[in-house]
Image (tube, rainbow, N blue to C red):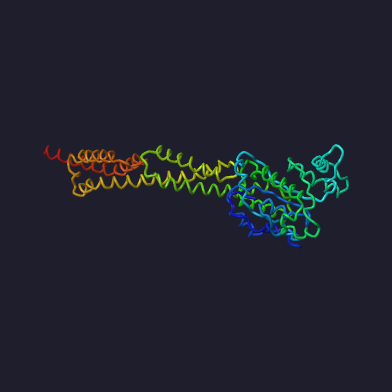
Amino acid sequence: LTAQQSAPGDPICLVENHTGQGLAVRQDALQVLANITQPVVVVAITALCRSGKSYLMNRLAGRRTGEGKGGEGGGWTLCAPMLGFLSSVDQWLTSTVLVWGCRDAELSRPAPGAGRQQRAELWLFCPAGSSPEAERYDLLRECIRQFFPQRRCFVFNLPASVRDLQHLEELPEHRMEPEFLRQLEKFCCYIWESSRAKSIPGGCKVTGKMLGTLAVTYVDAIQSGAVPCLESAVTALAELHNSAAVREAAVLYQELMEQRAELPTETAEELLELHEQCQRETLQLFAERAITADVERFRLQVEAARLQFCSRNEEASREKCTAALQELRSEMEQRIGDGVYFVPGGHRLFLGDQQALVERYRALPGKGVKADAVLQEFLRNVEPLARSICSTDRALMEKDERIKRN
């Protein structure tokens, strides 16, 4: 049963039991569950064949009539909206509701000092014996006690005459026993009022898609011969959904950074502040999507993306600064080609022009985090030329001195 879905359709087989092949999850049923994105309230009904499972399922789903699945094996599912659960699902973390139908005349008989509920509890706690068959019988009751700590016993009278029982799903209410209808109403109200959204360890609400994944994992474990374990199924589910949550969060982080980052940033701190802002927003998305608080995995993914942006920021700064220096240096290169600096006193002229270039470069805005590094690299590359001009200047000045002395 699920909240906020369309009107219930026909029951659909979720888990098939093929003779000689074992269990298999139906893909069409998984697709139905995959379309349910809201938290689900799961009510499981189990009983022997022809004991009223389909009828109870239809009534819980709000259907007065419906097709029965008597004689068809496997597990069947019926999705229906149950809006009454929505007001309190955020305040409860309870497990699946199990409706276990059995034909036990002893429960309907009055007993001295014990009501029907007490008799049902005694049946669950009373050992059946020490034989292997009795131990298996006791194990089932032990599992019921552990997984379903809150239990309630309901007893139904025959709903109609023996002749009408064969067509119970199509039988109108006026032909049913009034006492049975009162008992049925009491049962349905109890399920509707006491059931809560299904959750898994950690408090995460289970959606229809997640429920389908759990079913596949559990059935695969049975088919492989492993011991089916809910914890293992939850771990596999968490891994699947957390991986998807990390990917979605990383994509959102990338999009936010691309939209807001104007590379190169003036300082590394500016990019860091933007990173922290985008990380907070994507962390909120991750927390909504993830099943467990695998925040470290999320941070590692975002950190890798941050480092890429830092590298891109540095590269953008380097390219912009290099282009700026090339443009500023063009006038000096023209003077170098004209031999302006290769005259007596040319070194001092060269140093003056170089200092003017540096001051103009430093005055340019938006150079980014590599502004000083690119400038220092530029000055190192120019150093051989400066030494050459200095040597030429010194040689020319010495030559002039010799000429003057002669």
* Viewer-side residue, 64 vs 41: 64
Q: Looking at the image, is 394 positioned above or below residue 81?
A: above
Q: Which residue is painted at 46% across and 42% down in the image?
A: 278
Residue 286 versus residue 62: which sits nearer the camera? 62
**Does residue 158 appear left or right of residue 44 in this picture?**
right
Q: Residue 16: which quarter of the image?
A: bottom right
Q: Position of residue 288 (x, y in %)?
A: 55, 44
Residue 357 shown left or right of residue 37 in the figure: left
Quadrant placement of the C terminus: top left
Q: Residue furthest front?
A: 174
x then y, percent, for residue 397: 17, 39
Q: Is residue 110 visible?
A: yes
x and y percentages locating residue 252 in the rendered image: 48, 47
Residue 143 visible in rendering:
no
| Foreground residue among 342 and 307 | 307
Residue in the picture at 73% in, 58% down: 171
- Measured as percent of width and height from the top left, residue 276 is found at 46, 39
Q: Residue at position x 26%, y 38% from top? A: 359
Q: Residue at x 70, y 44 (%)?
A: 190
